[in-house]
Amino acid sequence: MEFPLEKVKTWAELALTCASLVAIPVGGWWVYHNFSAEDTHEANPNITVTAEVLPYDDTRRLLMVHVKPKNLGKVPIELDGGKKGDIDVLVKTFPAGLASGRVDRDKLPVAFAAHNIVSKYNGGYVMEPGIDYDEIETFIVPKGSTYLVYTEMDHYDDTPDDEVDDSAVVKVD
């Protein structure tokens, strides 16, 4: 019995041609979907802030601020510090005598600040996709006050309005 090699070769060429004709539009759709529809080539940072209060002495408390930047995108984000990507923390006081209604965060007085957190690392750092980071900043604060803890990551991209921020309110007793 003889194996029909020529017939198998013809059918194999036809199958490969058909597969190529299907693969080209599928590959084009995949490229469009990933780069245009989902923007997988764009930076997608997120930042959250939480605060906890620990005892320090009779009149003051230790305010521990957890700044948690995260890269939700698929490309690394380089934070080099200063004007090339950095993180700031502002601890603002709610002064006595505020009128009832909406509180304008920008008008609250800054009591404590930690500027350029990334700058303390020589060369900054790279936020890899999907990794959770936790920067801890500590402040000694008087007890009996309420604070708005605000954090902002800016200049992580080349666009002028490239910032993400978060805030939390903490009562210090």
Image (spheres, rainbow, N blue to C red):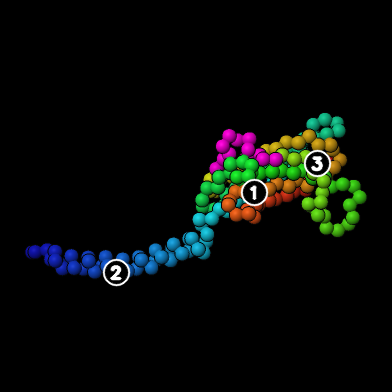
Q: Residue lying furthest top in this view?
A: 57
Residue 14 rendering spot, x and y as whole percentages? 24, 69
* Badge 2 or badge 1: first in the primary sequence: 2
Q: CA distance from mark 2 to mark 1?
A: 50 Å
Q: Is residue 139 above or below residue 43?
A: above
Q: Amino acid at mark 1?
A: Asp
Q: Locate residue 33 relative to residue 151 in the image: left or right.
A: left
Residue 87 rendering spot, x and y as whole percentages? 66, 44
Q: Locate residue 16 relative to residue 83 in the image: left or right.
A: left
Q: Amino acid at mark 3?
A: Ala
The magenta span reads 115-126
Identity of the residue drawn at 48% across and 60% down:
34
Residue at the disc numbered 2: 18
What secondary structure is found at the residue carrying circle 1? strand
* Residue 121, numbered label: none
* Residue 111, numbered label: 3
Residue 33 rendering spot, x and y as whole percentages? 48, 64
Q: Quadrant of residue 65?
A: top right
Name the foreground residue: 109 vs 5: 109
Residue at the disc numbered 1: 154
Q: Are marks 1 and 3 in contact (CB under 8 Å)?
A: no
Identity of the residue drawn at 52% across and 48% down:
76
Identity of the residue drawn at 82% across and 55% down:
103
